[in-house]
Image (spheres, rainbow, N blue to C red):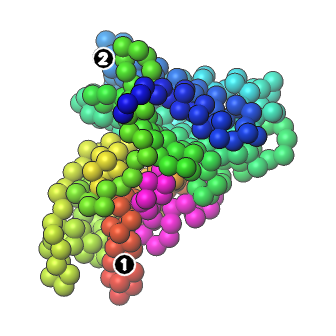
Amino acid sequence: MDRLVTIERHILNQEHQHPEATGVFSNLLYDIALAAKIIARETRRAGLAQLLGMAGRINVQGEEQMKLDAFANETLIRMNAESGRIAVMASEESSGIIPIPEAHCCNGRYVLLFDPLDGSSNVEANVSVGTIFGIYRRISQSGPGTLADCLQPGRALVAAGYVVYSTSTMLVYTTGRGVDGFTLDPTLGEFLLTHPNLRYPSKANYYSANQGNQQYWSAGVQRYTRWLQGMDPDEPSNPMAARYVGSLVADFHRNLLAGGVYYYPADIHNPSGKLRLVYESAPLAFVAQHAGGLASDGQRRILDIEPDSLHQRTPLFIGNRELVERAEQYIQRYDQL
């Protein structure tokens, strides 16, 4: 790149393309970026700050909560609860909607949903983790935001993105007009535009799945996996390399940059899938779509699923469009036998 572009400048440049814009949405995006900086700082020094290990309580998913999970969750709530921009929030770590103080909610135009620290079980092993977020316009007319505001299908998103905390911290987001990536320069304390207009490469290199569960997958998913490995006798293909981190954000990010597919299908232990629709699958599906990719539950687009609960789970196939469509074909062909 031949000029330095901060995330703030980039957001403002986008705002200037919309004469009707008031700046509220721009400031919301910048608040999320600021929260990401705070979480990145504490992630880097988690051991020194005694943020490693369990927090001693169980979250709504029935999982023991990590200390860094709790910190990331509280940071995102504090950064947005009193901004006046948000009508209501919901988090993977909270059982219900997160109400906004009455003095700040009634004029809030937007709804913020987030997974504060995806892959947190990997923190103590120094493996990449991340934050996933989605932003909707409120649909309630007045007063405090409601559960219905949070249960909108992914196609109604106005913005979505994620942050990867790793050897560098990177924030990737879309407002439906291309996908852009920003890398945090710790010496400046600024996110700088380093990956403009991200698109899935035409050649896919990787597939990402927890093959420890393969024996529990349906016949269609198992046959699809063999095709990815170049082992389907009826449909020869070049084998793809397997890469699986176990942090959804990390696996998704690598496949976006290098081309590939991530999948966490339904299995006999999780017949409805394991990943959360509104906090993980829908926001990443929105990013994938605007990077030229696709996300599906194996039968329908993730963005078309109408949520019926905050913690609804779903199977997920996401990445290069042709690889996701191939998964749907295998499932339709072999799971209907």
Q: What residue is disc 2 on?
A: 47
Q: Specify whether residue 272 is painted magenta.
A: no
Name the residue rendered at 38%, 39% in the picture: 195
> Is residue 81 found left or right of 191 in the rendered image?
right
Q: Earlier in the sequence, mark 2 or mark 1?
A: 2
Q: CA distance from mark 2 to mark 1?
A: 46 Å
Name the residue rendered at 18%, 62% in the picture: 240
Where is residue 268? Give x, y as percent: 35, 66
Element at label 2: loop
Where is residue 189? Give x, y as percent: 43, 16
For label 1, count other residues whose C-alpha is less than 10 Å away and answer few (under 14), some (14-19) or many (20+): some
Q: What residue is disc 1 on?
A: 329
Name the disc covering residue 49, or none.
none
> Is residue 125 found left or right of 264 in the rendered image?
left
> Is residue 78 found left or right of 208 in the rendered image?
right
For label 2, count other residues whose C-alpha is less than 10 Å away and answer few (under 14), some (14-19) or many (20+): few
